[in-house]
Image (cartoon, helix red, strand yellow):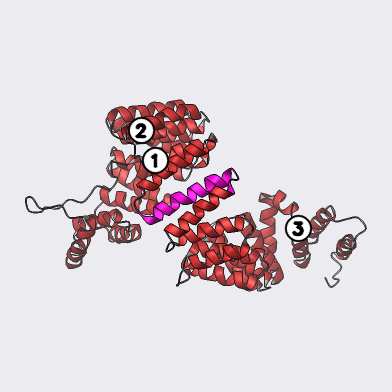
Amino acid sequence: MLAALSFCSVMPTAAIARNHPAVPTPTATPDAGAPTPSPTQLIPGLEAQLKASPSDVTTAVRLVQAYLQVGRPAAAHDLAQHLLASGVTKNAKLDFFNGAALRQLGRYPEAITAFQAASLLDPTDAMLLVELSNAYLQVNRIDEADRIARRALTFNTQDPRVFINYGVVLAVQKRFDDARQQFLAAAKLDPSNALPQLLAARTYVDQQQLSSALPLYAAVLRTNPNNISALQAEVQLAVAQHRIADAIAYDERLYSLAPDDQNKATVLNDEARIYLSVNDTQHAGQVVDREVKAFPQLALAHISAGDFAISQGREKDAVTEWTTALGPQQNNTFALMRLGVFALRKNDPQHAGLFFQRLVSLDARNDEAWFHLGQSEQLLNHFDRAREAFRHAFSIRQTVQAFADIASCDYELHIYSEASQIFDQLLIQTPKFVYGNPNLLYIVARTYDRANQPAKARSAYYRLLNSVKRGSNDEKLIRGYIANLGKGVAR
């Protein structure tokens, strides 16, 4: 539970900038007394203006800004890139908004480049430097994050955002006392903002000093009894201290404050998990039943019911609930993942593959879905399809297992050259992974053998002998392979 409070997950810039938006609302020149249009209202007019005057950079930058404000970072980035490629005069705002769009898209190295370009034009802007510092944190370039955070402080001594940001950077470095000083300074500059106190409390949690964190959360709740972040933290601290009744009471307050059914169901999910964490299946089941009865139309409720059923060994009930969660279009990715994994565990790769194929058609960036699709195809001996799925998974997230599975499929497809190259890398980078997996080590040895690399094959075979029983048929087979190395004997 405490992982959610850890600074190991870097504080998002959105939290740092709370009450101080990174992307200010675009201004217009309405008639006196007329309400300022929202970004959603502004976009059609800005698009029309830009279409009529494609070279109007001011309108284009305002449109990029508006796209960001309504949660359309891809559109913002595309327009910004078009402007930058067209040779527009250097513009700090445009580079900044482009960086913000890239950050929202999770493309942090490119975001850093954009923010750096903006900082060359505007080297002291507080929010720009906060964004750049945070982007460095996201790619674990801590020293540079620290340097930029201190620069922001130098030029913006009255801006609480820069103190909050520097506090986060210090907390990531586990310099908790120094971090709390920065959060305290931010709180003095902006007493109405609860975020500095919440972050200071989090530093105590990271130090496992829960008794020191509690008063800070309590202080926030005295000022604002409905502060969601503080209530969520109180839930997690109560669970950590085994105060289950208190945790449930705080969750019920969160339930009453939840703005919609989806959020209410999420709170009930949390309550069920809390009861399960102390093996109280009776109350957990009651909460799950309550969730399904209150929100029968929500996939989340049925996923929760399915998860609870599987935890109790009621497989048929679990499948029924997850299938209900799929919906008429069969497009709930969480339900598809559960049904696919369940089918794999039941040794039904045919149906598993159908679930994962549907999942990747809905979410092509889901590396876990691609990996499981590869496993399904592999079990069906569709090694060409499995290889392609594992390649997709590896392109998204470079895991050792996916890399090894690509090579295993290469072996089955007689693509020994590529397989041996992959195994070369694995043996250099993660030898324990290879040597600790006899089935994989067998494929490694056979790959080198088939690739006419007898020295490497011999080494792998001898390693493999350590994993088989002396005198067994497996030992005889391996020793036969060793004896035939380099003799041109059919293998």
Three-letter amino acid code at disc 3? Leu
Q: 237 left or right of 406?
A: left
Q: Which residue is mark 2?
A: 220
Three-letter amino acid code at disc 1? Ser
Q: Is residue 151 visible?
A: no
Q: Earlier in the sequence, mark 1 or mark 3?
A: 1
Secondary structure mostly seen in the magenta stretch: helix
Residue 376 screen position, x and y as percent: 63, 68
Q: Which residue is mark 3?
A: 441
Residue 321 screen position, x and y as percent: 53, 64
Residue 152 screen position, x and y as percent: 33, 35
- The reply to whether the C-beta atoms of the residues labelled 2 and 1 are less than 8 Å apart is yes
Q: Would you place residue 88 above or below residue 204 in this image? A: below
Q: Secondary structure at mark 3?
A: helix
| Number of marks | 3
Three-letter amino acid code at disc 2? Val
